[in-house]
Amino acid sequence: MGRQLKLNLFIYPGGHHEPAWRHPKSQTDRLLDIGFYQELAQRAEAAKLDAVFYADGPALESNVQYATRFRIEPFTWLSAVAVATERIGLIGTASTTYLEPYNAARLFASLDHLSKGRAGWNIVTTGAERAAQNFGLDEHPPHAERYSRADEFVRVVGKLWDSWEDGAVVADAGSGLFADPSLIHKIGHEGKYLRVAGPLNTPRSPQGRPVFVQAGSSADGKAFAAEHAEAVFTAHQSLASAQVFYSDIKEQAAAFGRDPGQLLVLPGISPYLGSTEAEARALNQEFDELTQPEYGLGILRKLLGIDLDGVPLDGQFPPDLLAAAGNAGSRSQLVLDIIRRKTSRSARCCTGSPAPAGIMYSPEPPCRWRTRSSAGSGAAPRTDSTSCRRGCPGALRRSLMRWFPSSRPADCSAPSTRAGLCGSTSASTGPTASMRRRQTGSGLRCIDFPDTAPCEYKRLHAGSP
């Protein structure tokens, strides 16, 4: 069987393009309507996408004046989405800096139970310095320290999930034995950053643990992903930089003793969809014309320390400002790449949305795209305020197939035993393999779904620790 693309819907309130909420056909009145997000997930599931993803952060964005940059607590939201869907994966963001391992373990175990084994964890260390004051800290921990804590954090939550062995829940009404205490263990962890006694007070979940996802392009972030993650979110503005990232993360995974093929790289795109290329480009232009330069200037100040106050926006971008720019974060690296490619153009070109964009169209007249909602997306049949009529996801698939001929989208005639996002086919998955897996008799595998729903995401783990 050939390689397959893994498609995920990155849902961002108001859209990734910052003025999407201003588009006349955006439904800003539904941004806090859970029914809206349930509908997005249902459309993604019907189109055979693998997962929906919710970003999160523990502080209010400073640019909320210009864009819908508020945050919705992902576990509550994903729980509501879970009951409205059946198979699509549910990836939520949780910070290892501003959350305790015990709470995180309970939240993900509960989501995994509620969704019957569809939970995924986007592991972040939180880059927003202002978050510290929301948690009683005087200052935000340094970048390297946050990743050091994250490494210990992931290992601790793994121990907590493993504190209930398979078979611990007996539920024998006749004997009166509900749980076997000999199969429930304290973890007694005492490390550099964390002290946790355990055991977890939530029984072992269907997956054993959620799918691990991570996004980070810094040296620390890539090393962390290479050791722990099963999928890596990334964004690049050129094929060359994407290829360098891909090779680097795969080589690092191999250095940790992992099979590089089991670490998926998921680049983000914001596609503009239309029946023709001209229609798609016109939609892109509609959004760009709604951009407020003040938003982009704020992004440059926050991420890079670059201040363009007093610089004519229609003049050339001052190359000397790049020398003073610097930040280890992945988003900062992306913005720097954009600026370096555009330094010969006006400064105004660097004040728009940093999301990688793509123009996609279908030459088939029946597949007409229309602006409907204000939800953002990554690689999915939606972008910013654009959605498709029923059946139109084929346009996205045809476009992707033109770009990636060696891959093919899922189709209902394919075998139903292939892996979903987890991509795991053996127990050789690095240090995270020390976590106990579900006993199913033969290695790591995904749950088998009927051929009518081949894009499975849920999984069962097997094998001894």
Image (cartoon, rainbow, N blue to C red):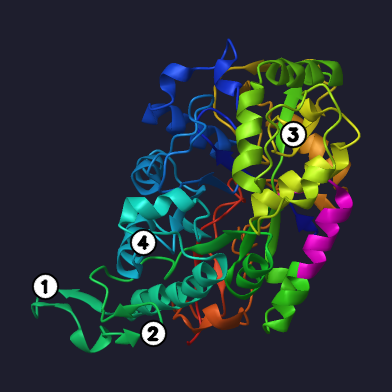
Of marks 4 and 3, the one in the foreground: 4
In this orientation, does residue 409 appear? no
User: In terms of secondary structure, where does tag 3 sit?
Assistant: helix
Residue type for callout 1 = Ala
Residue type for callout 3 = Leu
Say whether disc 3 or disc 2 marks the residue closer to the N-terminus: 2
Circle 1 residue = 173
Q: Is residue 151 magenta?
A: no
Q: At 61% across and 66% down in the image, what residue appears? A: 230
Residue 5: % across, % down: 73, 51
User: In terms of secondary structure, where does tag 4 sit?
Assistant: loop
How far is disc 3 from disc 2 in space, using C-alphas? 47 Å
Of marks 1 and 2, the one in the foreground: 2
Q: Main secondary structure of the magenta part?
A: helix
How far is disc 3 from disc 1 in space, using C-alphas? 53 Å
Say whether disc 1 or disc 2 marks the residue closer to the N-terminus: 1
Q: At 62% across and 75% down in the image, what residue appears? A: 227
Residue 396 image label: 3
How far is disc 4 from disc 1 in space, using C-alphas? 37 Å
Q: Does 354 sit left or right of 183 as displayed?
A: right
Q: Does 179 sit left or right of 157 as displayed?
A: left
Query: Which of the two residues, 358 or 146, is positioned nearer the viewer here?
Result: 146
Of marks 4 and 1, the one in the foreground: 4
Residue type for callout 2 = Gly
Residue type for callout 4 = Leu
In this orientation, does residue 343 appear? yes
How far is disc 4 from disc 3 in space, using C-alphas? 37 Å
Q: Does 246 sit left or right of 130 as displayed?
A: right
Of marks 3 and 2, the one in the foreground: 2
Are the residues tagged 4 and 3 within 8 Å (C-beta)? no
Circle 4 residue = 99
Say whether disc 4 or disc 1 marks the residue closer to the N-terminus: 4
